[in-house]
Amino acid sequence: MNSPSTVVRNWFDQGGQAYSRFRPEYPLELSAFLASIAPNKTLAVDVGCGTGQLTCQLADHFTSVAGFDPSDEQIDHAVPRNNVSYECAPAEDIPLLSRSAGLITAAQAAHWFDLPKFYTEVRRIAEPKAVLALISYGVLRLEGDLGERFKHFYWQEIGPYWPAERQLVDTGYATLEFPFTPIETPSLSIQLDWNLDEFLGYISTWSAVRQAREAGREDLLHGFARDLAAMWGSSKDRRSVTWPINMRVGRV
């Protein structure tokens, strides 16, 4: 079993590489559903693509996929695919031709956008009957005492360090303005079995963790890591982690 100090030492300062390694993968049913409602399979666009978690899954269904993210670090660590291109660009100024995209997605990203400007770009690049999908996954669920300790950490300890936009994720984007014809979506979730290092690696990618560190509250983070290490059992033991997937999907 790892000592608490080892857990803490491995947790921080991991950057875009950690984002690529630890961010949970979406279920394959998500990209298959999105492809099934697009007007064609020519071009999908993933805005705020990060390191390409959803981007690469869309590549299984579309001739070409374009991923855009404003962070050079994220793009530098993006997963390559033959039919995927990546470019550093903001959601509000997408470098694509007008009326070129059949599907436009934003996964775990739309809460950072200037939505009116983004929607203007969506309307510009969308082909007739194109689909826009805003996707998020909610607060993770752990079982038993681990779940209770996580809830306290999330809502009471790290909660004040989340930016205001995080509330939009916690509510499943239900309060976002969405001026498009809605499309009914299936019930989906992300389900993984993670060991302790994988779980804490994921936590390390949170913007709230960066904010807490900058505020000098690493004690909160170290305390949580120590508590989980004591409760987890062997650090190699795998625990079930589940995230509900929330979507706002519509016809442009």
Image: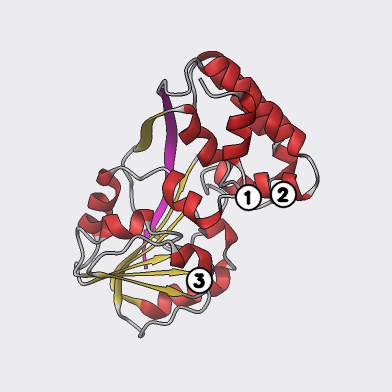
Boundaries of the magenta span: 239-252
Contact, mark 3 vs mark 2 (Cβ under 8 Å): no
Of residues 77 and 157, the one nearer the viewer is: 77
Amino acid type at image mark 1: Ser
Q: Which residue is mark 2?
A: 211
Q: Is residue 250 magenta?
A: yes
Q: Is residue 201 left or right of residue 226?
A: left
Q: Is residue 4 left or right of residue 161?
A: left
Residue plotted at (59% across, 31% down): 6
Across and down, in percent, residue 82 comes to: 22, 68
In the rendered view, tell whether residue 132 sits above or below residue 20.
below
Across and down, in percent, residue 66 comes to: 34, 71
Of residues 40 and 243, the one nearer the viewer is: 243
Across and down, in percent, residue 31 comes to: 27, 52
Q: Quadrant of residue 85?
A: bottom left
Q: Residues within 10 Å of mark 1 (few under 14, many from 20)?
A: few
Amino acid type at image mark 2: Gln
Residue plotted at (34% across, 38% down): 188
Q: Which residue is mark 3?
A: 91
